Image: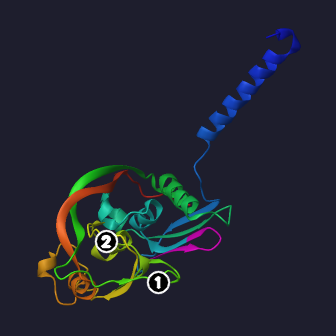
Amino acid sequence: MDASNGSVPRLVAASTCLISVVVCLHGQSPPAFDAVSVKPSPLDTIERSLTHNAGGRLTTSNGTVRMLILLAYQVMPYQVSGGPAWINTDGYDIEAKAANPNSTPEQFRKMVQTLLADRFQLKVHTETREMAIYALEIAKGGPKLRPSASDEQNPGVRNGRGETTGVRATMAMLATALTRPLQREVVDETGLKGEYSFTVKFDPVETSMPDTPPELSGAGSIFTALQEQLGLHLKVTRGPVRILIIDTAARPSAN
């Protein structure tokens, strides 16, 4: 190559620019809210709330750090371990606004993670632990599930109080949805590959204790409801569960 025509300098300059871009991309700051206010809630506040409002806004009233962690990292309470006791009890009134009102749910969760790191000095890591879980199986007598019609709208599984509804739902989707009322990991071992539509109703009070063995559950529990209404059975077993470990956390300084 003839260096006299300037090709080498241009090539070096282009390579330098490329390296600079890569460095900038890897060194960029994590997504963060444009404006944040964090204040301790009045001691006489009882109710707690956390809301993801339109326009990329986060609002809490007497919200706890644990509530923020569940939102930011998309984990269930049984998946969080460690941390000081106050993260479960101290309440905070938080107003946070994103610069981009059209931020995606993933971007919003990243901003909450940044808020936790900046204002509460939160540091976490994940581990996989062998824990008690439930396996969703076909009950004796076979399944009682209606195959979905291909034109049914709004597919998915939705939890309500004392009710779980599926539309064009797979058994894997049902297993995932059951983790919320059961507060324990649920895996699909039915072997059923189709899509089904169903509604299963149960007593939410009897389902609020995850350590109750299915065979000792009451008549209105979700264990009994699944068996009688859908022909499905939950079996206690063990399996890998992803756990979020809280390494450090500190109460925030005043605004």
Q: Are marks 1 and 2 in contact (CB under 8 Å)?
A: no
Is residue 48 shown to the viewer in this render? no
- Classify the position of the N terminus by image quarter: top right
Q: Is residue 20 above or below residue 156?
A: above
Q: Residue 191: percent from the left, percent from the top? A: 28, 68
Give the number of the disc on residue 180.
none
Q: Amino acid at mark 1?
A: Ala
Q: Main secondary structure of the magenta part?
A: strand
Q: Nearer the viewer, residue 216 or 3?
A: 3
Q: Please tell me which of labels 1 and 2 falls first in the chain.
A: 1
Q: Residue 216: percent from the left, percent from the top? A: 11, 80
Q: Residue at x 44, y 71 (%)?
A: 63
SS type, badge 2:
loop
Segment colored magenta? 48-58
Please give the residue where the numbered disc 2 appears in the rendered image: 192
Q: Please give left or right for residue 132 compared with residue 53 in the image.
A: left
- Does the magenta-highlighted stretch encompass residue 177? no
